[in-house]
Image: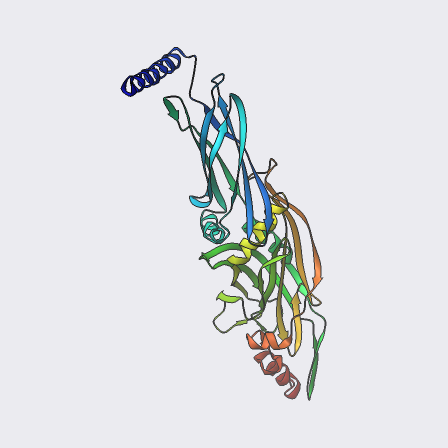
């Protein structure tokens, strides 16, 4: 009796399988299809950026459920995998339905991606893939939905644009020189003929930025090589802040002096903290992929204890921009300049002296020439 019952069950199973197989072959039943419907940002905090993915699953089989379906998800920028996850036990009834998957961005991998982004001229290839594993009857499938896009930023262009605000002639307040028989009042002038900016070396920890100035000395006396100070803020996150000693001079005059009538090309290297870049990225996502970028810069040199700045009067250039991306937010990506203004900037004479951005005109050949003209007048 037991054997006969088992044989009956086996025959039924085979019969059902044959029936389902025939229905699949006839096109009456089919393997469910699936694809990506949407990607969106979820909750964001100090060390967490959530990604919410919606997948559609279409089960065309009337009265049949695709039970225990599973979903795998991965997100990468420039082949750096920033998020991945899976979801099992998904019930797929007849018809078209959606399911959501919540994953967290690998916060610690953002600096790794940033390196590739900078090395690729601030361009990243976005790749999102969701694969759904479903089965109905004797057949199963793993349809895959993909989304690709290009993500671009223009920070190098933004910084170069900001530096152009420093071009032109800058005149300092009068400086009185008194050395016994000679008293002279000078108004030091500095001419910035051209500026530029470009990325330098980049590691997982730091990104180097090179700022270049063509500095002309129109005075009849020499000037010291100026110091460079400033900061870069993204959504109020200071990704870079440098004082006179932090900006390394990569190119400039050997004796750190700009002679009268001469023009020198000065290139300064400053560094961005890539951990702060990750911190900024969270604020960027939380603000619907919008960032307010502020760049501040000043050149300064000391003349006989008086600080001469570019711009003049102890101020700095501060330019602000709005930057947008369209990773998951449906909007136009790009950069819009909001404006530039002068801002007070504190720089001590001790900082300038520490980096050698000082000159004592009383100890120059120009001053000696003035003394000779007074002490040995022409007969």
Q: Nearer the viewer, residue 132 or 68?
A: 68
Can you say whether 203 is above or below 175 in the image? above
Residue sitting at x 41%, y 12%: 27
Can you say whether 65 is above or below 288 in the image? above
Can you say whether 316 is above or below 175 in the image? above
Residue sitting at x 58%, y 54%: 46
| Quarter containing the N terminus | top left
Q: Position of residue 311 (x, y in %)?
A: 67, 63
Q: Position of residue 49 (x, y in %)?
A: 55, 48
Give the colouring mode of the picture.
Answer: rainbow
Judged from this view, the residue extending furthest toward the left is 3
Q: How many numbered badges does the structure rendering display?
A: 0
Q: Position of residue 68 (x, y in %)?
A: 45, 31
Q: Nearer the viewer, residue 153 or 185?
A: 153
Q: Nearer the viewer, residue 379 or 163?
A: 163
Q: Quadrant of residue 316?
A: bottom right
Q: Quadrant of residue 309?
A: bottom right
Q: Nearer the viewer, residue 124 or 13?
A: 13
Judged from this view, the residue extending furthest toward the front is 1
Q: Quadrant of residue 305?
A: bottom right
Can you say whether 217 is above or below 115 in the image? below
Is residue 11 shown left or right of residue 150? left
| Quarter containing the C terminus | bottom right
Q: Is residue 84 visible?
A: yes
Q: Is residue 325 visible?
A: no
Is residue 230 shown left or right of residue 119? right
Q: Position of residue 300 (x, y in %)?
A: 62, 69
Is residue 254 shown left or right of residue 163? left
């Amino acid at each position: 009796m037991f054997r006969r019952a088992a044989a009956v069950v086996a025959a039924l199973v085979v019969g059902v399988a044959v029936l389902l197989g025939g229905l699949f072959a006839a096109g009456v039943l089919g393997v469910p299809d699936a694809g990506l419907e949407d990607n969106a940002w979820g909750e964001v905090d100090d060390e967490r950026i959530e990604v919410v993915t919606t997948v559609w699953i279409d089960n065309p089989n009337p009265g049949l459920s695709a039970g225990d379906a599973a979903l795998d998800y991965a997100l990468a920028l420039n082949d750096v995998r920033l998020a991945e996850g899976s979801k099992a036990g998904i019930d797929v009834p007849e018809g078209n339905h959606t399911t959501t998957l919540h994953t967290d961005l690998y916060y610690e991998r953002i600096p790794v991606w940033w390196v590739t982004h900078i090395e690729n001229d601030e361009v990243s290839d976005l790749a999102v893939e969701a694969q759904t594993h479903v089965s109905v009857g004797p057949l199963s499938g793993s349809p895959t939905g993909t989304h690709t896009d290009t993500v671009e930023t223009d920070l190098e262009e933004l910084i170069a644009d900001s530096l152009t605000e420093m071009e032109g002639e800058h005149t300092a307040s009068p400086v009185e020189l008194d050395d016994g028989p000679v008293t002279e009042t000078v108004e030091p002038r500095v001419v910035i003929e051209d500026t530029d900016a470009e990325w330098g070396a980049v590691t997982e920890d730091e990104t180097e930025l090179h700022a270049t100035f063509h500095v002309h000395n129109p005075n009849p006396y020499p000037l010291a090589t100026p110091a460079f100070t400033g900061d870069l803020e993204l959504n109020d996150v200071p990704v870079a802040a440098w004082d006179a000693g932090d900006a390394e001079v990569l190119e400039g005059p050997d004796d750190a002096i700009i002679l009268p009538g001469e023009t020198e090309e000065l290139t300064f290297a400053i560094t961005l903290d890539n951990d702060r870049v990750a911190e900024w990225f969270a604020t960027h996502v939380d603000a619907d992929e919008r960032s307010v970028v502020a760049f501040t810069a000043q050149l300064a040199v000391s003349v006989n204890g008086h600080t001469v700045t570019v711009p003049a009067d102890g101020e700095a250039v501060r330019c602000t921009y709005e930057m947008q991306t369209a990773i998951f937010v449906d909007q136009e990506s790009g950069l819009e300049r909001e404006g530039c203004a002068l801002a007070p900037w504190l720089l001590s004479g001790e900082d300038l002296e520490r980096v050698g951005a000082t000159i004592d005109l009383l100890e120059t050949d120009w001053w000696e020439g003035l003394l000779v003209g007074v002490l040995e007048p022409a007969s």
